[in-house]
Amino acid sequence: MIIDCHGHYTTTPEGVGAYREEQKRQVAADPKYVGQKGQVKVSDDEIRESIENNQLKLQQQRGTDLTIFSPRASWMGHHIGNESTSKFWTEHQNDLIRRVCDLFPKNFAPVAQLPQSPGVSPANSVSELVRCVEEMDFIGCNLNPDPSGGFWKDASLADRSFYPLYEKMCELDVPAMIHVSASCNDCFHTTGSHYLGADTTGFQQLVMSDVFKDFPELKIIIPHGGGAVPYHWGRFRGLLQDNGYPTIEEAALKNIYFDTCVYHQKGIDLLLDIVPVENILFASEMIGAVRGIDPETGHHFDDTKRYIDNNEKLSAEQKALIFEGNAKRLFSRLKV
Amino acid sequence: MIIDCHGHYTTTPEGVGAYREEQKRQVAADPKYVGQKGQVKVSDDEIRESIENNQLKLQQQRGTDLTIFSPRASWMGHHIGNESTSKFWTEHQNDLIRRVCDLFPKNFAPVAQLPQSPGVSPANSVSELVRCVEEMDFIGCNLNPDPSGGFWKDASLADRSFYPLYEKMCELDVPAMIHVSASCNDCFHTTGSHYLGADTTGFQQLVMSDVFKDFPELKIIIPHGGGAVPYHWGRFRGLLQDNGYPTIEEAALKNIYFDTCVYHQKGIDLLLDIVPVENILFASEMIGAVRGIDPETGHHFDDTKRYIDNNEKLSAEQKALIFEGNAKRLFSRLKV
């Protein structure tokens, strides 16, 4: 079985965007707009079509089985609106993921976005996490390290304001993927420099903190191959040592997992060569950041299964851990 | 000959810090403090000692010959004070670099910091660049893509406000290394996530812009091995293609060079395997971000010459380009 631990619902039917646009209109007129949850007008047939012609088709073409599926990351838009609009938008986005997983229970497993908002305590996201996990059988969540959308105005993941959320994650035994949303800062390209910078930043915030000492059971996924981390493994090992922290094995690898959203063979080969196999999860981010076909290979850039298949160093058993075993161990609530 | 293209004067005598602390005291009391250039009280003997016992000693130990040397990056502190204090501080820092190079002309060649300041046009840095290059024989400059120190509040490097600076760089034929200073944002670790994130960000700002079309002769160095870029080469190739830009060879490699400040063998091997040899410059960042000894090798993490020596794919001729040939070609004002 092949489990892709990082997929987003990037192909939502029109009604989803229409709901969000209406919210944006309201908050543009009144930043303190509260509103009501209201409805997202999307039929089951529309959802079916949006999935069958996209993610499901590509799953079948590429020979993967199950995608751990969450709302479109760039649309989380925590910097847009306020705590109230973010709450309603998030609930709808998570409800939609549940519907996808109900329609295709063998192909998708649900992961939640959280209703974060700039300047609002991460503790306020706990109730949505509980709703998703306890009432809707979600198996994990995405945690945004920069709800300000590229200005990095909120607290570091090392800050104790995140502790109620970490406590609940441990209690529920669900991992979080550290994943920013769109950048509203012209300095950053959302799916390039912003995503990769946030991956590196999230990693560093956590490993140079007390978080894993205080929450030894906390499970964190750093997506996009860990940003710059594996390529700069020596720098991070050296920085930890220079600053009196434990080794990277102690400070990071008991809690942190890296996904394989790296879109070329040599990058994947480095990741698989640097990070212990037990800390790597297969992922493609499909359909996501890069949608084209690599003219050098004739295959989609994000068809990351090929790169792992083609890796010459790992054994079949090791690849099976990356494709399946590690995800099953990490996502203890996954029913397969 | 072995040229290290990335070294900072991180070991300045006490008088340098004392000058800066006094400036900080003044601007803390009055943010609009103008002051005067004043004096940095440092003797030639102090400079000699600070270099002989540190960078020069390590050059000799490691078998390198010449370091392209600029003021301590984390001390540029463009977010501190105002345009006036930044100007005076920058002039002193560059004057100091000139003194180091006068004392050790065979071992160091000078690169300038610029007197950037948040909200101040990059055009205002042109005069200091001209002073350094024309009056003091500097051969390049460092350009900070985030003078706000981790909040990314200023314009992208793609913005036309940088054009007067790019124009002058081309006219003088001097390259710029894209290099942030310290982060004053708790979300970032200065020499880890902030440096690496800024490298990736600077690269993406430039390649997805008109800058190299408008300045085909512009020469840019992305330090720290290019941040996350070589590891995510496929992602950047795919993003360029998806967004209608030319190939990475066209969009980046005619103007951009990557240094080798990557602190482990496998990372260097990836860099040397991905980026064309002509676009790579030997560098160690010594004495800089990581100062310890790697217990796995028994050598300093930042002794990057070893990793290149040990690389098994490149020929001696190719390594000579990285160690010497490329730097001589890029730094046309370097006299060796």
Image (tube, coloured by chain):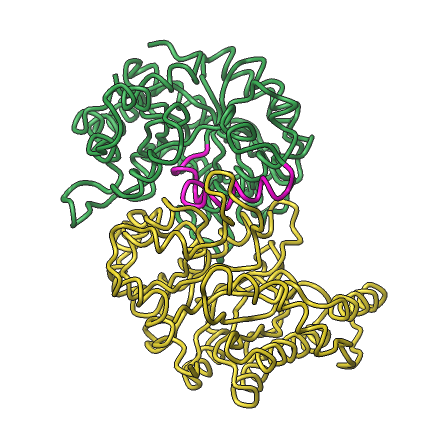
Chain colours: A green, B yellow
Left or right for A230, reference A289: right
Looking at the image, the residue that sits furthest to the left is A298
Residue B2 in the image: above or below residue B236: below
Q: Where is residue A229 in the image (x, y as percent from the top left)?
A: 45, 41
Asked if residue A162 shows in the view, the reply is yes
Which picture quadrant has residue B174? bottom left
Asked if residue A41 shows in the view, the reply is no
Left or right for B87, reference A28: right
Residue B327 in the image: above or below residue A7: below
**Residue at 54%, 59% in the rendered image:** B286
Left or right for A84, reference B258: right
Residue B296 in the image: above or below residue B314: above
**Magenta-span inclusion, residue A237:** yes
> Quadrant location of the N terminus of chain B?
bottom left
Looking at the image, the residue that sits furthest to the front is B61
In depth, the one of A130 and A160 nearer the eye is: A160
Q: Where is residue A336 in the image (x, y as percent from the top left)?
A: 33, 10
Q: Where is residue A245 in the image (x, y as percent from the top left)?
A: 62, 35
Which picture quadrant has residue A281? top left
Magenta residues (range)? A222-244
> Quadrant location of the C terminus of chain B?
bottom left
**Magenta-span inclusion, residue B224:** no
**Residue at 32%, 47% in the rendered image:** B235
Q: Position of residue A328 (x, y in %)?
A: 38, 15
Which picture quadrant has residue A104? top left
Q: How many marks?
A: 0
In depth, the one of B141 and A312 nearer the eye is: A312
Looking at the image, the residue that sits furthest to the right is B29
**Residue at 54%, 20% in the rendered image:** A129
